[in-house]
Amino acid sequence: MTTTTITHLVTHSGGFHADELLSSVVLTRLFPNAGLRRSRDKQWLTPADEKIIYDVGGDYDADRQIFDHHQRPGPLREDDQPYSSFGLIWAHYGQAYLAAMDVPEHDIEDIHTAFDTKFVLPIDLLDNGAIEPSVAGPLSILTLPALLGSLKPVFDDPSPTADDDAFFAALPIARSFIEALVRNMAAKARSQSIVMEAIVKAGTSPILELPTGMPYRSALEKAEADHMLFVVNPRGDDWTLNGIKLSNDTFDQRADLPADWAGLTGTALEEASGVKGAKFCHNARFIAVASSRKAILQMAELAVKANQ
């Protein structure tokens, strides 16, 4: 990252898209004292040591701190997929941004790569027309680029500052999504050693007990713990029993809770399961709740037997 004092962050005026909005999230975190200027004026788009110019300017030159992708040919990743301004900014400033977000140094490289793959690349591809919004099917209107785009002013807004006003109103909303995902990725990294220790402790048991709710599926895959069917952990004053999804893209599980528990609560669930303290089982049979560790482990053992 540049050591020169940055006084201005410059992107284009007019309507906005997700790529320069999300780029602005990263850059304003790193350079909080810099002014954010939206302009197409040649004077503002002339590179200088104190400026970072992005999504405008017709050039990509990291040494001159200009990060546009609209020129031909546009900048490409090593695998020939196109960059948007967000991808360029993330490639050059993403690791510094993660450090500014207090991500531990030993996790920065992995999280930088994962965030690029899961979050940045789809923005790049969509902005360049390399994928169509229709790939999201009926959820296309609910994708992040579509939602951020919906924050643009309506066509007949009479205010001469409507575009800028909408951009700066959208910026903290975009920031909340990036920061939340980074925090979740950092938390997932922190959870890995805890889950791995629990896997070792469980041995050949199909039941994984964790000290609290936390991400666990990637650690299960890393440990190749395919024998594990259910996870238990405390939650407040209760304990939960969870099925393990086959992947993040499906609701299918390695094993379901017993069918005769589905949708039951309280006394009805206690009678159906034979477990004193059983409190709730979701109708979709992916989670159950009990009042004690003893009760939840009894339910877990019954669930295992029902799947054998």
Image (tube, grey):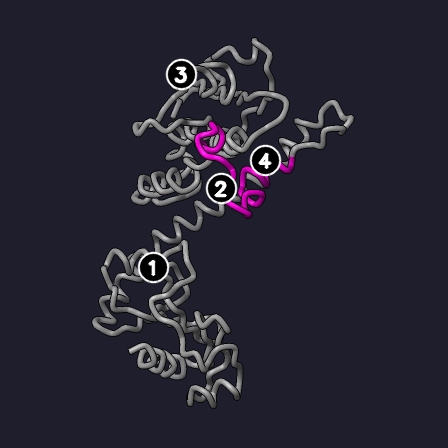
Label 3 and label 1: CA atoms lie apart by 41 Å
Front position among marks 1 and 2: 1
Instruction: Tell me the CA gap for discs 3 and 2.
Output: 29 Å
Residues under labels 4 and 1: Cα distance?
Answer: 33 Å
Q: Nearer the viewer, residue 277 or 138?
A: 138
Instruction: Give 9 or 132, whichever is nearer the viewer.
Output: 132
Q: Residues within 10 Å of mark 3 (few under 14, many from 20)?
A: few
Residue tagged by mark 4?
A: 171
Nearest the eye: 179 or 127: 127
Dot 4 or dot 3, earlier in sequence: 3
Q: Amino acid at mark 1?
A: Arg
Q: Which residues are magenta?
A: 124-151
Left or right of 139 in this view: 213: left
Mark pair 1, 2: CA separation: 22 Å
Could you tell me the amino acid type at mark 4?
Leu
Counting other residues with Cα less than 10 Å from the Cα at mark 2, is it few (<14), some (14-19), or many (20 or more)? some
Q: Residues within 10 Å of mark 4 (few under 14, many from 20)?
A: some
Provide the residue designation for mark 2.
178
Q: What SS does tag 1 mark?
A: helix
The first of marks 3 and 1 along the sequence is: 3
| Quadrant position of residue 200 | bottom left
Residue 249 image point, x, y percent = 41, 54
Number of the front mark, 3 or 1: 3
Disc on res. 217? 1
Kindly report which numbered mark, 4 or 1, lies closer to the viewer in this rendering: 1
For the residues bearing labels 2 and 4, Cβ distance under 8 angstroms: no
- For the point 58% across and 43% down, the residue is 141
**Dividing the picture into quarters, in which one does residue 42 lie?**
top right
Is 127 magenta? The answer is yes
Residue 73 badge: 3
Q: Is residue 84 above or below residue 178?
A: above
